[in-house]
Image (cartoon, rainbow, N blue to C red):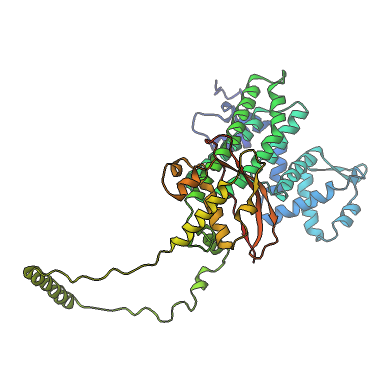
Amino acid sequence: MQNFSDDAHVQTGDDLALQTYFKAGISPDDVSAVFPLKRAQPVLQAFTALFHGGFNAVLLRLLVLRELTADVESPSLTRADINAKLAYLEPEALETVLSRLRGNGLLAWDSGAAVYRITPTARNVMAALESLIQVEEHNDQAEMSYMLTQVAGAQAVGGVSVEQLHHLLGRLIELTEEFSDAIASGSEFQLRAAQKKWHTACDWVEKGSKIIHAITHDERADAATHKAAQAIGRAQSALLNMQGMFSRALNQIERQRVHLGQSGLSTTDIKTWLLQKEDLAALADQALAHPVTPLFITPSEMIDVAESELLSHRVSALAGALPTGENAVSIANDNDDALHELDHWLDLLSNIEPGEKGVPLQDLLLPASFAVASYRASMLPLLGDPNESALQGATGTLARLPLIFQSKDKMQKLNDTQLAAISIASLVAAPRADDTPTAASPIQETP
């Protein structure tokens, strides 16, 4: 309950200033979240002393404090030692920084020994900053390493808090939603980027599983801590289960990928090439030999032309004349070669006997040109496709073949004139007809 008695609490200037941010009739002391922040005032004041002002001023203070805390050989520093260590700074600037650090409890002045001493608060602040800086240097795409490090350190000394677990839980939920949005987008590039970030997140989840297991089995932890740890475990499971969602989405994109004739190139290859260009407008240089010439026409001329066209069609309709026939343009069948190649390849795949260890992928795709090898590789996702296997034709026959595609996330070099490398993969005869293979990995063309 709030006490409005004048003699119950003597308000200071800071209290009055804080009260101005709250609604009338509500005291900051009535809000439970304010108390732990007020209790941490010395630490927060240290951060304020370091980070108040412009970036250059903040950088200078951190530079000075970092240089001073780096000297661990002696617990104290004379002014001569400080001047020698920071001789590259202007004396006035150095004096201003030292005065600010000393006035906010980050440096302690021992008047008896005439030396400076680093306070424990300063070392705690710099230790936290060094952890953040190290996280940025390691380029943690999932941005989980710092929070997991804090939880691991707190658990090691027996002081993990519910707030620390909630921060980690919130990050796991954010990552799950981010990956779900990437899968729902249907964009291959977003899926590839999200999958790479997902692998990083899974590495940290694997490292943190033992920590969460220790927290859930810690008898000293309270109910809120156990509940938060269990929620983190469920969030980790949901994150790990997204591997199948990524695979299905990428396989669907692979089946729907459009290839440009028999060149072996797809629309994804074209988009990747365009993204590597810094200036797309430069590709149109000298592409147009003549500029577009605009034509202008008045409304009267438009009416005359429309009237003429209308009357001509009306006369043709009254006469009952039919338009003269034209011979259909003969078009060469470009699919004959592709169908012939597919039939030849089906014979090769049909010879794979059950019980064999597997036929290497290069033995099935080669020898052939890059275009033919790419065409064969693009047909591999059809193996085991339930929709395609219900159709007639060569592709339906391919989908019904009892073969399993096995691949590794590695590539091997080839001694071939047109192919430089190919994924390490093989085709194995399936013991059951309902086994579904995974999608084929692309091959790399020799430059």
Observer-nearest of 268 and 429: 429
Q: Is residue 393 above or below residue 260?
A: above
Q: Is residue 221 above or below residue 210?
A: above
Observer-nearest of 161 and 427: 427
Quarter containing the N terminus: top right
Q: Is residue 54 above or below residue 392?
A: below
Can you see residue 392?
A: yes
Residue extending farthest left:
318
What residue is shown at x 92% (from left), y 44% (from top)? 74
273 lies left or right of 200: left
Quarter containing the C terminus: bottom right
Provide residue 4's location: percent of width, then percent of height. Answer: 54, 24
379 lies left or right of 223: left
What residue is shown at x 48% (from left), y 73% (from top)? 284
Observer-nearest of 391 and 63: 391
Provide residue 293's location: percent of width, then percent of height. Answer: 34, 80
Provide residue 385's location: percent of width, then percent of height. Answer: 49, 42
Provide residue 153's location: percent of width, then percent of height. Answer: 75, 33
What residue is shown at x 84% (from left), y 49% (from top)? 68
Residue extending farthest top:
219
What residue is shown at x 57% (from left), y 30% (from top)? 28
How many numbered marks have been drawn onto this rendered protein structure? Answer: 0
133 lies left or right of 366: right
238 lies left or right of 416: left
Observer-nearest of 225 and 61: 225
Q: Hey, which quadrant is residue 90 in on the image? A: bottom right
Can you see residue 98?
A: no
